[in-house]
């Protein structure tokens, strides 16, 4: 018989969010951090992918103080094949937000594995749209859950971890399903989004605000955009 003192504690997702909405809140941005393709290790608050999302929250609040920012800490570091481990955590967080705040609109902001998680969680009824930051989007990734939602994908031209061409292909496949589809190339920046970080932060905040305001996404960077197969493509 196993000694109870030797049992490992059950890993649980953790939602970092204010206990209540601020007065006049215009919605919630839920930030989803990156991870690994395969790992059963637990996530801790001080891992770099978790910390990397914090400045995005600052940028969103700086642009729109009326918006509420929540951050989800996944249970496990990995996607783990068919288990798609972080997806259940994201759906739990979306339900928790509705339980805590009521029926509020949510925009998902996900980096790398968190970007893939956002696309899988998109069908939740509270979700207005998704901003994928250097997302991990294999060619088989489904797009059906994006029906009627807003989609923005930002990818650095020097990303050697996830594929910018796969991100563009995903955005093109989603174009006939999503309500609005935008793909943005961030020049001279890689997967960690540290080079030209302020550009990443500001663009993300602007797209989150546009989604919650029901504004045209193509106008966020109007001077750099062109139409291509029903999506807006920009290079910044």
Image (cartoon, rainbow, N blue to C red):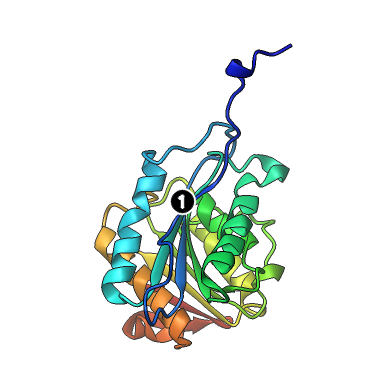
Q: Is residue 138 above or below residue 44?
A: below
The location of residue 158, given as percent across then percent down, is 37, 53
Is residue 187 among what the camera can see? no
Front in this rendered view, residue 178 or 163: 178
Residue drawn at x 35%, y 64% as measured from the top left: 186
Give the image quarter of residue 66: bottom left
Residue sitting nearer the eye, 53 or 219 = 53
Figure check: 70 above or below 113? below
Kindly tell me whether residue 17 is visible in this rendering: yes
Residue drawn at x 26%, y 71% as measured from the top left: 62
Locate the C terminus by quadrant: bottom left
Mark 1 highlights which residue?
33
Query: For mark 1, does the 10 Å Cα neighbourhood hold few (<14), some (14 to 19), or many (20 or more) residues?
Result: many
Quarter of the image containing the N terminus? Answer: top right
Is 118 on the left-hand or right-hand side of 194? right
Q: Is residue 102 left or right of residue 215?
A: right
Q: Position of residue 68 (x, y in %)?
A: 40, 69
Could you say where residue 83 lies in the image, as x and y percent from the top left? Answer: 70, 43
Q: Which residue is at a point 52% across and 57% down the rendered structure image?
A: 115
45 left or right of 82? left
**Residue 216 position within the rendered picture, expressed as x and y whole percent measured from the top left:** 45, 88
Could you say whether the residue bearing mark 1 is in a helix, strand or loop? loop
Q: How many marks?
A: 1
Residue 32 drawn above or below residue 179: above
């Amino acid at each position: 018989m196993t000694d109870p003192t030797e049992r490992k504690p059950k890993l649980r997702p953790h939602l970092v969010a204010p206990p209540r909405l601020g007065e006049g809140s215009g919605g919630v941005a839920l930030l989803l951090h990156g991870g690994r393709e395969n790992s059963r290790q637990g996530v801790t608050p001080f891992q770099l992918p978790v910390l990397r999302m914090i400045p995005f929250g600052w940028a969103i609040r700086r642009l729109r103080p009326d918006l509420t920012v929540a951050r989800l800490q996944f249970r496990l570091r990995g996607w783990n094949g068919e288990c798609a481990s972080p997806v259940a955590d994201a759906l739990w967080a979306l339900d928790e937000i509705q339980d805590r705040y009521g029926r509020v609109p949510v925009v998902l902001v996900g980096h790398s594995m968190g970007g893939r998680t956002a696309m899988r969680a998109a069908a939740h009824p509270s979700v207005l749209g998704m901003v994928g930051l250097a997302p991990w989007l294999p060619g088989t990734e489904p797009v059906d859950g994006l029906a009627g939602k807003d989609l923005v994908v930002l990818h650095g031209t020097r990303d050697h971890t996830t594929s910018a061409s796969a991100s563009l292909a995903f955005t093109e496949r989603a174009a006939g399903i999503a309500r609005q589809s935008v793909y943005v190339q961030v020049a001279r920046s890689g997967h960690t989004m540290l080079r030209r970080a302020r550009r990443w932060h500001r663009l993300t905040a602007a797209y989150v605000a546009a989604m919650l305001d029901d504004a045209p996404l193509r106008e966020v960077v109007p001077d750099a955009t062109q139409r291509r197969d029903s999506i807006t493509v920009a290079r910044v």
